[in-house]
Amino acid sequence: MKIHKLPVFKKDKRGIIYDCGKFKFLNRKKGSISADHFHNESEILILIDGKIELTINDEVKIIKAPVKIGIPKNVYHKLKALTNIKLIYERKL
């Protein structure tokens, strides 16, 4: 059996992101904002635990876990944690 600790990809006042290879695992604090951008790749978000305010272009929705969210490339998106959240994301090249 092989067990490996997940390396920290990034850590700041919002929380911590772990590098899971193809995926990233985010543990974010209530009130933190993630994304607030757009990029040239599509993205899959999997909200495992918690509640977020998700903005896609001009549309804003309150979303509770568990859900899977697809974000197309070149689309503005912003995520605000309304509770402490756990989220997995994958960028598709």
Image (cartoon, rainbow, N blue to C red):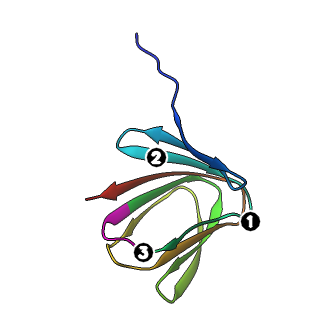
Q: Residue at x 46, y 46 (%)?
A: 24
Indicate whether residue 37 is drawn in magenta: no
Q: Position of residue 10 (x, y in %)?
A: 57, 46
Q: Secondary structure at mark 1?
A: loop
Query: In the rendered image, which quarter contains the N terminus?
Result: top left
Label 1 or label 2, whichever comes before in sequence order: 2
Task: State the residue position of label 3.
Answer: 38
| Vertical placement of residue 47 versus 54, above or below | above
Q: Position of residue 8 (x, y in %)?
A: 55, 38
Q: Residue at x 74, y 65 (%)?
A: 31
Task: State the residue position of label 1.
Answer: 31
**Disc 3 residue type?**
Phe
Q: CA distance from mark 1 to mark 2?
A: 20 Å
Q: Secondary structure at mark 3?
A: loop
Q: Position of residue 9 (x, y in %)?
A: 52, 43
Q: Quadrant of residue 40?
A: bottom left
From the image, state whether disc 3 or disc 2 is nearer to you: 3
**Disc 2 residue type?**
Lys
Q: Residue at x 41, y 13 (%)?
A: 2
User: Foreground: 29 or 49?
Assistant: 29
Q: CA distance from mark 3 to mark 1?
A: 20 Å
Q: Is residue 16 visible?
A: no
Residue 32 lies left or right of residue 43; in this view the side is right
Task: State the residue position of label 2.
Answer: 24
**Residue that sits furthest to the bottom in the current view:** 58
Query: In the rendered image, which quarter contains the C terminus?
Result: bottom left
Q: CA distance from mark 3 to mark 2?
A: 17 Å
Residue range highlighted in magenta: 39-43
Cβ atoms under marks 3 and 1 closer than 8 Å: no
Residue 44 lies left or right of residue 6; in this view the side is left
